[in-house]
């Protein structure tokens, strides 16, 4: 591809993690002189258009799964597979209908299986080539992974936001890839880096605990309620970043609790750097953000999300982050535990820039 090409960026709309890790891709493309076009829906669209208001965008509707209030999500998710397959076909129809209208030269899809084209170079970004199924669906593990790889193999390349070596983050989720298409490891993808300016916010403000809520309802709200109920046992200042970029109202301050529905990328970066400790889900994008800043955190995996549970176990085994289940969550445990854990500060961005440069030249 020559310089100045229009590349459609399509993050999955299951939470905002897929959108946040598309941010460095968008920034790198822009730095190389190309024109990213944002294709997203709901919270991911709000986040990326807020970060890049000058870019073209299109509403690309996606499918959001629903979750139960119980820990076991297997049956609930299994029943939604037909709707997921329908959504993939709708994504494919959208691309076919709009690729000429949007004057596209390529597509980068973060976990949107239908966002590819036979007429355009198409890339699939994922850290889950080998999917971990929740309890109740383990009997279908082999079939689901065969289906997952069949969808990925419709793209021209697969890009994994991780290191290719044994010293990686995702482990067997993406090592080995065993795909028919070329697989390239980009290193961690984070919108943050330790070298970023931290001047946003008041440097006099001290944050003892930053709670970063994310993920699907009702589990997001359930963890929020637990934090509020236990806040009185914590002596320091707690800031709760609610993960609700589209919400119009927020909760008022109460005691040592301050609530933010959402914040800009610069402000979130400031909050993370200013926090003594962080509590969050163990989503892969969150892990990449934390290790890009070398920040201590305590994980609370979304109940029933086997990928987050696996990643939390893997991070603890490496001595980087501690975790507990949502049912066993205790602020007292959170405060004492991270002293035994220390995440590394890992460089990101170099492999991404190299891969994007080669891809744009080859298309």
Image (tube, rainbow, N blue to C red):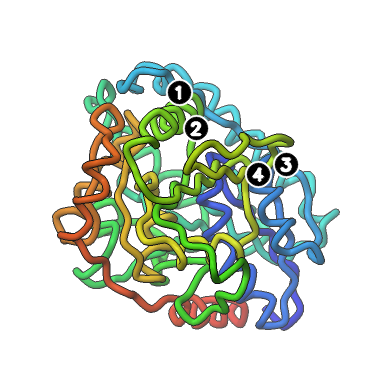
Name which of mark 2 and mark 3 comes first in the sequence: 3
Above or below, 32 relative to 76: below
Marker disc for residue 94: 3
Name which of mark 3 and mark 1 comes first in the sequence: 1
Q: Assess disc 2: are there few (<14), some (14-19) or many (≥20) residues with their C-alpha within 10 Å of its C-alpha.
A: some
Q: Quadrant of the C terminus?
A: bottom right
Q: From the viewer's perspective, is 181 left or right of 98?
A: left
- Residue 337 position, x and y percent, is 19, 51
Question: Residue 200, located in which quarter of the rendered image?
Answer: bottom right
Q: Find out whether the residues at labels 1 and 2 contact each other: C-beta distance under 8 Å.
A: yes
| Distance (Cα) linking label 1 and label 4 | 20 Å
Question: Residue 41, located in which quarter of the rendered image?
Answer: top right
Above or below, 99 relative to 217: below
Q: Secondary structure at mark 3?
A: helix
Q: From the viewer's perspective, is 85 left or right of 237?
A: right
Marker disc for residue 67: 1
Marker disc for residue 216: 2
Q: Assess disc 4: are there few (<14), some (14-19) or many (≥20) residues with their C-alpha within 10 Å of its C-alpha.
A: many
Confirm whether residue 185 shows in the render: no
- Residue 30 position, x and y percent, is 69, 76
Q: Quadrant of the N terminus?
A: bottom right
Of residues 88 and 273, the one nearer the viewer is 273
């Amino acid at each position: 591809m020559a310089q100045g090409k229009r590349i459609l960026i399509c993050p999955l709309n299951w939470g905002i993690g897929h959108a946040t890790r598309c941010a460095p891709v968008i920034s790198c493309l822009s730095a190389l002189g190309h024109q990213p076009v944002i294709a997203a829906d709901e919270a991911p669209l709000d986040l990326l258009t807020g970060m890049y208001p000058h870019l073209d965008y299109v509403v690309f509707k996606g499918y959001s799964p629903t979750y139960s209030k119980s820990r076991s999500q297997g049956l609930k998710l299994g029943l939604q597979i037909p709707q997921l397959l329908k959504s993939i076909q709708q994504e494919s129809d959208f691309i076919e209908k709009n690729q000429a209208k949007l004057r596209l030269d390529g597509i980068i899809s973060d976990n949107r299986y239908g966002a590819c084209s036979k007429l355009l170079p198409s890339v699939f970004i994922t850290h889950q080539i080998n999917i971990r199924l929740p309890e109740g669906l383990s009997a279908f593990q082999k079939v689901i992974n065969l289906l997952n790889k069949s969808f990925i193999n419709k793209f021209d390349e697969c890009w994994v936001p991780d290191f290719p070596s044994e010293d990686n983050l995702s482990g067997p989720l993406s090592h080995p890839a065993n795909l028919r298409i070329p697989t390239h490891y980009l290193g961690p993808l984070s919108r943050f880096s330790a070298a970023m300016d931290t001047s946003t916010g008041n440097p006099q403000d001290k944050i003892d605990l930053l709670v970063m809520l994310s993920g699907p309802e009702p589990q997001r709200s359930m963890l929020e309620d637990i934090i509020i109920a236990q806040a009185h046992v914590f002596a320091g200042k707690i800031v709760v970043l609610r993960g609700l970029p589209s919400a119009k109202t927020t909760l008022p301050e109460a005691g040592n609790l301050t609530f933010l529905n959402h914040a800009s990328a610069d402000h979130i970066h400031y909050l993370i750097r200013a926090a003594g400790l962080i509590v969050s889900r163990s989503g892969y994008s969150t892990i990449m953000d934390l290790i890009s800043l070398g920040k201590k955190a305590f994980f609370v995996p979304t109940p029933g999300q086997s990928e987050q549970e696996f990643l939390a176990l893997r991070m603890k085994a490496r001595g980087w982050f501690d975790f507990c289940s949502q049912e066993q969550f205790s602020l007292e445990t959170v405060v004492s535990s991270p002293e035994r854990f220390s995440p590394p500060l890992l460089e990101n961005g170099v492999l991404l820039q190299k891969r994007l440069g080669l891809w744009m030249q080859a298309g």
